């Protein structure tokens, strides 16, 4: 699969709107929500740690630049008022974003280099998991799953 | 030390350890993230068998492994050895169940 996050707009106008929206979103996050820059710092630190093979001592695959880019886009696409995840590497070369309230209410979203989002969530006795394609917006299923962990 | 040519099968009650060489695998509350137990990229997970080793000896093994790889040993955790998709509601089981099923396809 070609790893590329497609913008939703394909016309010149559509691309312009996407670009302006993204810039505005970034500006808002950087000014009003310091959490965003902290998240991106954490993403960078996680990548520094996981970008080489065997970063876990058990033969883990390196987390690639494609996975980094997709994780960045995923974090950029999160709503402003959303809780912040913690970030770690996955031995398969993914980024693992985790929203953790307690051992019984937690969700992990794994961002792959080829624009897939593997997620698994636990809410009490309820479990849900699956895979969604990532095209630049948070898939509704994952959005709802994260919200349910905090509901 | 186990004879490498005669490795006995793992007993269900045997104590095992997975060393944690990435601090990100440990949450702030001290619990362990499931990524620490992902059997990459096959359905096998490297662990250290306690057998007759003492706690001190297990830590020494972990430190030796970490030093040999120029990494820091951040902790260790006993993984469960039953099938992760067996009954049980922990997030680790849920998560591993999903990943193991995925990789087995």
Image (spheres, rainbow, N blue to C red):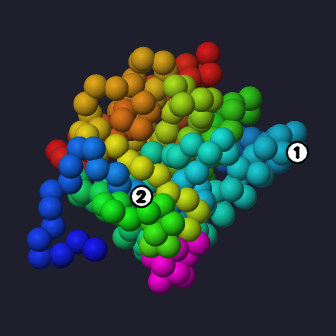
Residue B89: image quadrant is top left
User: Element type at marker 1?
Assistant: helix
Image: magenta residue range: B62-72
Q: Nearer the viewer, residue A124 or B14?
A: B14
Residue A5 seen by the camera: no
Instruction: Tell me which chain the residue with mark 1 is part of.
Output: A
Residue A10 highlighted magenta (yes or no)? no
Instruction: Give the image location of residue B49, x and y in percent.
Output: 32, 61
The residue that disc 1 covers is A31
Label disc, if present, on residue B18 of the rendered structure: 2
Instruction: Give the image location of residue A2, x and y in percent.
Output: 35, 58
Residue A74 falls left or right of residue B7 = right
Q: Nearer the viewer, residue B19 or B5?
A: B5
Quarter in which the C terminus of chain A is drawn: top right
Instruction: Give the image location of residue B91, x and y in percent.
Output: 44, 33
In the displayed structure, would residue B76 be above or below residue A99? below
């Amino acid at each position: 699969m070609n790893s590329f996050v497609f913008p939703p707009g394909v016309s010149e106008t559509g691309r312009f709107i996407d670009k302006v929206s993204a810039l505005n979103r970034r500006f808002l996050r950087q000014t009003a929500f310091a959490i965003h820059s902290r998240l991106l710092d954490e993403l960078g630190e996680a990548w520094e740690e996981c970008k080489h093979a065997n970063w876990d001592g058990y033969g883990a695959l390196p987390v690639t630049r494609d996975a980094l880019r997709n994780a960045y886009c995923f974090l950029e696409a999160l709503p402003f008022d959303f809780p912040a995840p913690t970030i770690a590497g996955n031995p398969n070369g993914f980024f693992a974003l985790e929203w953790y309230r307690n051992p019984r209410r937690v969700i992990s979203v794994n961002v792959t280099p080829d624009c897939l989002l593997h997620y698994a969530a636990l809410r009490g006795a309820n479990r849900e998991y699956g895979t969604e394609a990532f095209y630049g917006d948070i898939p509704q299923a994952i959005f709802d799953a994260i919200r349910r962990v905090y509901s | 030390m186990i004879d490498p040519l005669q490795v006995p099968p793992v007993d269900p009650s045997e104590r095992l350890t997975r060393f944690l060489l990435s601090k990100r695998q440990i949450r702030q509350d001290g619990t362990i993230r499931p990524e620490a137990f992902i059997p990459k990229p096959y359905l096998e997970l490297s662990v250290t068998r306690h057998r007759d080793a003492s706690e001190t000896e297990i830590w020494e093994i972990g430190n030796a492994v970490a030093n040999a790889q120029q990494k820091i040993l951040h902790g260790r955790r006993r993984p469960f050895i039953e099938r992760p998709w067996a009954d049980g509601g922990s997030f680790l089981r849920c998560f591993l169940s999903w990943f193991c099923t995925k990789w087995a396809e």
